[in-house]
Amino acid sequence: MKISIDKNEKTPLYLQIAGKIKRMIFNGSLVDGYTLPSERSLAEKLNIHRNTVVRAYSELKDEGLITSYQGQGYQVRYRSIFYGMVKKPVNWDALIKEQYLRFESDFDHLFKKSYERDIISFGGGMAAREPYPPEEIALAFERILKRHHDQAYFYTPDQGDLELRREITAFMNTKGIMTKPGNIQIFSENNQALDFLMTLMLSPGDKVLTQEILSPDIYRTIQVAGGQLVTVPMDEKGMMCDDLAALIEKENPRFIYVDSSFHNPTGAILSVERRKKLLELSYQYRIPIIEEDEGSELYYDAGEVPSIKSMDTGNNVIYMYSFSLTMMPGAGISFVVADTNVIQPLSKLVSMKLVSLDWVPQMLLLEYMKQGIFSRRLDDFRSICREKRDLMCHHIDRISSEAGLSYRKPAGGVYLWVKLPSGIHARELLEAAHREGVTFIPGYVFYPKKHVGNNYIRLNYSYPAKLQIEAGLEILGRVIRQTQQKIQIK
């Protein structure tokens, strides 16, 4: 064992010795069981006091790298202890933040069932598959790759592709929202957009005002950011707004979140009067509104209702829109329209957390928007989803005549919010239906406190095929009747 020391260095000699022995142990030069020189012999070799060697060896013993035996001196023992020790697993629960451990997982688990081939799923919230045939998508990809053949790496700017933002600007103009490409931030989906907005705007303990029935994706994102939910009841016209002024003064919320068009899961649409009322309160109390509006294109029985953002002359509304319901499933793009004072720091935050936004979905959407295909396909989506809605309602009406289901037929969107017969609980019905190959989302997951909603289920009709809707509801009706019979027997 060769050790040299420098008496002119400021590092104490015993630390120089301990450090060099430690390095030799870790690089394998000193193997387990190697006997180190005695204190006296090493001190004489280095021409230092014996106590200096004693301190160096004590330092290594404290780190568990060497040990001493009576009559044998000091030996390396690091690797033998490591491989022979009792393995103690990491306590991950203690390391992971509590808010992530407390995640309610029923919603995620059931949503994933939408991808299983042997399951008829009414649980997803995805676009209809029919308007975009695979062959057409393949041709679109071919055109994109030919046009960008010299682009070695598929990166896009932090704010999103400029040409796409220009197309979105024109699209927003058709919805009465006058904006500019610089006021648009691209995301992959609305959940991601909301997560970034919460990071930007919300501090632990801040309160958020929102409707009581709420997608788990929304309330979990707010809660993980440290926000506290202040929920407001809703009816068929959306969030009740009559007494909000008193609630705002009491709770002092950071912002108001509202799902304005064909609300998930109830299908309710916020009335124009209540949209105007929310905007008035925003101006009065200087509270921003986050408006989610992804379902607004899927109207069937009446025209499109103007968004809150389209009425916003004071620029108080942060508008979130997603193409997840009007593009092919899995290729959705989301964006935020907001004041420059919001978009600029939001884009900087994106640049810190993401290397690049998804290039392929952006180019695919751009291709369809530039060719005018997207706007034409909206009519296809409306037609297909209207037919599926009517088909689902027809079968539920048939079930209701025997089983006593009730619901309000939505004027658009992709969901039916169905009330179960008395005595049937959503969780128990879900377990029975799943055994028969059908799944849906139980209503209680849409209540942040899980205190109500077990007498409701959410059914999605946009994604399953018509034959699946018919077969799935046949099974669901049978399971409901069987459950009722068991209740009567008890």
Image (tube, rainbow, N blue to C red):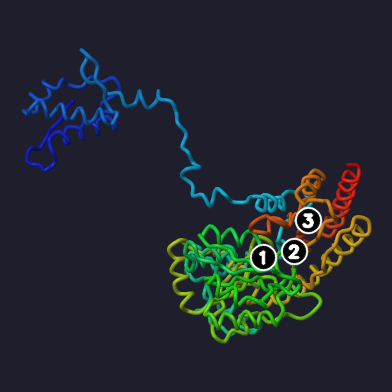
In x, y percent, where is residue 479? Answer: 86, 48
Report the Cα–Cα distance between label 1 and label 2: 28 Å
The residue identified by callout 3 is 455
Q: Which element carries disc 3, helix, strand or loop? A: loop
The residue identified by callout 1 is 212
The residue under the point 80% across, 43% down is: 435
Report the Cα–Cα distance between label 1 and label 3: 16 Å
Q: Which element carries disc 1, helix, strand or loop? A: loop
The residue identified by callout 2 is 128
Residue 70 visible to the viewer: yes
Discs 1, 3 touching: Cβ within 8 Å: no
Given residues 71 and 405, the one toward you in this image is 405
Q: Would residue 75 be found to the left or right of residue 163 on screen? A: left
Q: Quadrant of the C terminus?
A: top right
Q: Would residue 43 be found to the left or right of residue 28 on screen? A: left
Q: Residue furthest bottom?
A: 313
Residue 164 visible to the viewer: no
- Crowding at label 1, few (<14), some or many (≥20) Cα neighbours within 10 Å? some
Given residues 133 and 254, the one toward you in this image is 254
Task: For marks 3 and 2, give the one nearer the viewer.
Answer: 3
Disc 1 or 3, which lies upstream in sequence? 1
- Crowding at label 2, few (<14), some or many (≥20) Cα neighbours within 10 Å? many
Disc 3 or 2, which lies upstream in sequence? 2
Count of numbered circles in the view:
3
In x, y percent, where is residue 449? Answer: 64, 56
In x, y percent, where is residue 485? Answer: 91, 46
